[in-house]
Image (cartoon, rainbow, N blue to C red):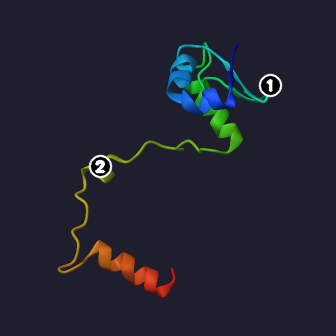
Amino acid sequence: MKRATLTDTKNNLSALVDQVQHGETILILDRGRPVARLESVLREGDDPEGRLARLERQGVLRRASSPLPQEILMTAPPTPAQGASALGALLDERREGR
């Protein structure tokens, strides 16, 4: 495990992240005391299906219960009314406090 001071981490974050992407774990020290660990979120053997299951258990996501109906993808999106403005709608909402 490589060690880096807080100053080195601030100055060389991109290089450290590159090392982490290649499997290195970096211990970050502040005045000689460990304060954080920089490591990859992908571990060896970490498969996407396992990651989805973990996120589902944590309540971060919910998988679809059925496939997406194809008519949603084939239907053209609605056209805006004549003179409609997204910016105008946003400004109206801000004025109304929504």
Which residue corresponds to mark 1? 32
Query: Which SS class for mark 2?
Result: helix
Quarter of the image for residue 40 reads top right
- Which disc is residue 68 wearing? none
Which residue corresponds to mark 2? 73
Q: Nearer the viewer, residue 26 or 88?
A: 26
Find residue 33 and report its horizontal and vertical position in percent.
Answer: 82, 27
Quarter of the image for residue 84 reads bottom left
Tell which residue pokes out farthest to the bottom in this image: 96
Instruction: Please name which of the two marks, 2 or 1, marks the residue nearer to the observer.
Output: 1
Which quarter of the rendered picture does the N terminus lie within? top right
Q: Amino acid at mark 2?
A: Leu
Find residue 74 and report its horizontal and vertical position in percent.
Answer: 25, 50
Tell which residue pokes out farthest to the right in this image: 33
Tell which residue pokes out farthest to the left in this image: 82
Q: Is residue 18 above or below residue 30?
A: above
Query: Which SS class for mark 1?
Result: loop
Q: Amino acid at mark 1?
A: Gly
Find residue 46 and report its horizontal and vertical position in percent.
Answer: 60, 19
